[in-house]
Each structure stands twice: as structure tokens, then as C-alpha cells.
Amino acid sequence: MSEQTTTPDTVSTSPEAASGDVTPAPAAEAPAAPEATAPVDAPPAGPAAATPAPSADAAPGEAVPAPGEAVPAPGEAVPAGAVPTEAVPAEAVPADDAPAEAVPVDAPPAEDAPPAVSGRSGRGRRVAWAVARWTVAALVCGGLGAGAAYGIAGMERHEVPGLATEKDGRWEYPKLSLPALPAGVPRPFSDGNNGENHYADLRKLLLPAPAGATVDKKLAGGWVTVDQYLAEYDADKRPALKQALTDHAVRHIAARGWTMPDGTVTRVYLLQFNSGAFTRAFQDDDLGFGGSSGAALQGAADMENDPRWTLPEEMDTSSYVFRETEPYGPEQTRQGYVVAGDTLALVVQSKKGGTPEVPFHQTVVLQNQLLG
């Protein structure tokens, strides 16, 4: 079956038509145009009746109504200005010559846009709160740690738990300090002091009594007589020693004694001569101690060198320690000497049942430090 094509009547563009003397024929219903690929920018095709197809017999120069343009009704004249002399299809306009059109940027769909949030979200608030809590906890712990460190640093070793020295029988003595010297006076073992003299008050060089001690009122840290000192030695030795002290011109004798709660009795004597040479002469010629205890003490005739006694090296003083050998009767006596320039120290301790070693050594060491 062959396809019929009906050609619509054409509109003449001759001068007669422009003058209005020509009446166009009625427009016939146009069949559908052949299928063609529409350009991307072309408007969508409307009904076939709205856009008449050009006739194959149309003469060149005849205008074809543009899409959307009204077609004159039969018997209606076409205005002169409405008929172009040359029709240019819209598809024929080059893309480069066409005016540029602004391409609007489409906003993202409402469902894709993030929701507006006023303030922090619930998760953000929880994170901030957790950070704040940990910060406060760290500051508190840091403050407590610093306070604890400061408290421990300000404590004495024996006050810190775990660091306190285990009790070994030592006594608790006051903090020791050397007495002040007159202006321009040297220490006993400094350069220029050839006599190794102690220029400080001899009584201030005496070791103080430890905590808990009961001080002997007769030996309270002041001056004592020669006879009080000689009472420590055996009776038959006293006359010779007294004469020796006169010969060596002893200057002063100071003494302190005390008794501890456990019954240990301590007596300390300091004898001061004119120089270190007189002190050593009294030691060697009269007391006779060194390798042995020398002149016997009252009630303790048999003494021996203490094998457990040691004194730090590089000392300007000399020390000698002895103990009473067994059997020693109802009480044991310990004896110590310190030779320090112009001063001689005698330390005596006794206790029923036996004299403890540690506090005796401690007493000798501290008295030695005060004289050195």
C-alpha cells in the first residue's frame, strides 16, 4: 500500500501578494512529516497540524511559516512586514554565532543537603564533656602528685615510710653545729695555726646529751676540776697523773654526763693544753694509750682494743677505742680517746650486763667531729 503525500498550498511572495490583492487559499490539513532526528537544542515537535511541511513544488524564495507563527485565515491579507524575503531555518544558525546563554547551576536536591544544625550535636557535646572530665582529672592528679612529692622532699629520711633507717640502737642526738669563732681567728687545723689550738669556748665543743637522757648534775657541761677528771682512773694512778697535768699546764677541763633509759651511763671530758705538743706529751708519757689502753680506769683494769672500731680516713684527729674484756663483773666499761690538737677527749660508757657497741661508737664519732 503506497503512502499518499498531500502538498499544502503555498503563499506567494510576489508583489501582488504583498499589496493585498492575492487571497491565499485555505490551508489544508498537512500529513505527518517524515521522521527526522531533531537537534538537541530544537524545541519538542508539536502537533502536525501546527507546523505545515514545505511543498515540493514550492518556488524558491517562498517563506514557510515558522513554528508557532499564526497562519492567516482564508481571505485575510498578510501584512507586508510579516513576510520575510528569505527564510532561514532555526537549525541553520551556527552555535558559535548564537548569543551565549547563562547556564543556571542547579542547587542540590533538598534531601542531599546536610541538615542545618544550631549548636553542637549530641555526640559533639558528649566528646567535649569527656575531654573536660579527663582534663580536670589530670589536673587534680597532677596537683596531688606534686603535693605528695613536695611533702616527701621536705621530710627527713627517717620520716619517709620505707626509707627510714632500721633501728640499730643509735641514739637521737640534737643537730650538731660548730661554735662561732672570734673575727680573724683560724680553725684548729687550718694554715697558720701551728699550735692546732681551738679558739672556741671549750664547753661549746662538748657533745650534747641525746634525746631521752637524764643529765648528770655534777657534769652538766661546764667546767670541772682536775680531781673530778682524775676520779675516772684507778686510785693509785691519780697522784702521778695530777702532777703530769700540772707539768703540762692544762688550761681547762669541761665535762658532761648523762644516763639513758636503758641504764647506760656516759661521761665525756675535754682537756685543753697550750698546744698540740703538750697534748701528745701527756698521751705518750703519762696516760700511755695507743697500742693499749694505758692508765687503767676505776673498776675496769683489763681493757682491749675494740676490733670493730673504724674511723674515716683523712682526719686531722686520732681516735683510740677500747672495751673491757670478759669476765667483766656486774657491768662492762668502754673507753675512748680523741686527740685533736691542743685538746684531749675522754669518753667513758658503762652499763650493767654489757655496754652496747653502737651508741658508744656513735658517741665517739660525733665528739670527734666537733673537735676536728
Image (cartoon, rainbow, N blue to C red):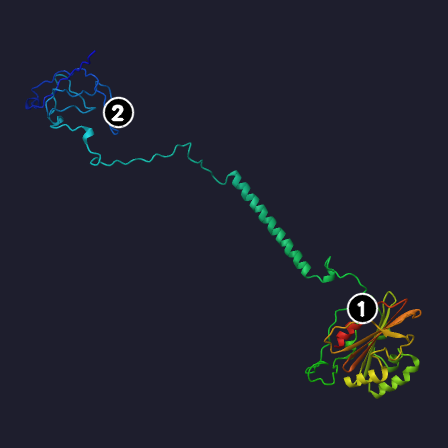
Q: Is residue 109 left or right of residue 312?
A: left
Nearer the observer, 325 or 162: 325
Question: How packed is label 1: few (under 14 Cα within 10 Å), some, or many (20 or more)?
Answer: some
Q: Quadrant of residue 229?
A: bottom right
Of 225 and 92, which appears nearest the observer? 92
Q: Is residue 64 above or below residue 273?
A: above
Question: Decide: marks 2, 1 in contact (CB < 8 A)?
Answer: no
CA–CA distance in space, label 2 to label 1: 119 Å
Picture residue at 13% right of the left edge, 26% below the top? 82
Q: Residue 310 appears in which quarter of the rendering?
A: bottom right
Quarter of the image where the C terminus is located: bottom right
Q: Amino acid at mark 1?
A: Pro
Name the residue that disc number 2 marks: 44
Q: Is residue 71 left or right of residue 348?
A: left
Residue 66 relative to residue 187: left or right: left
Q: Nearer the viewer, mark 2 or mark 1?
A: 2
Instruction: Look at 20% across and 29% down and name the residue there.
Output: 91
| Amino acid type of the residue tagged 2 in the rendering | Pro
Residue at 78% x, 85% y: name it.
277
Q: Position of residue 269 (x, y in %)?
A: 83, 77
Report x, y in % for residue 281.
81, 85
Which quadrant holds residue 294?
bottom right
Q: Could you say which is closer to the camera, residue 213 or residue 278? A: 278
Q: Which label sits on residue 210?
A: 1
Quadrant of the image containing the N terminus = top left
| Residue 108 locus on image (x, y percent) | 38, 34
Q: Earlier in the sequence, mark 2 or mark 1?
A: 2
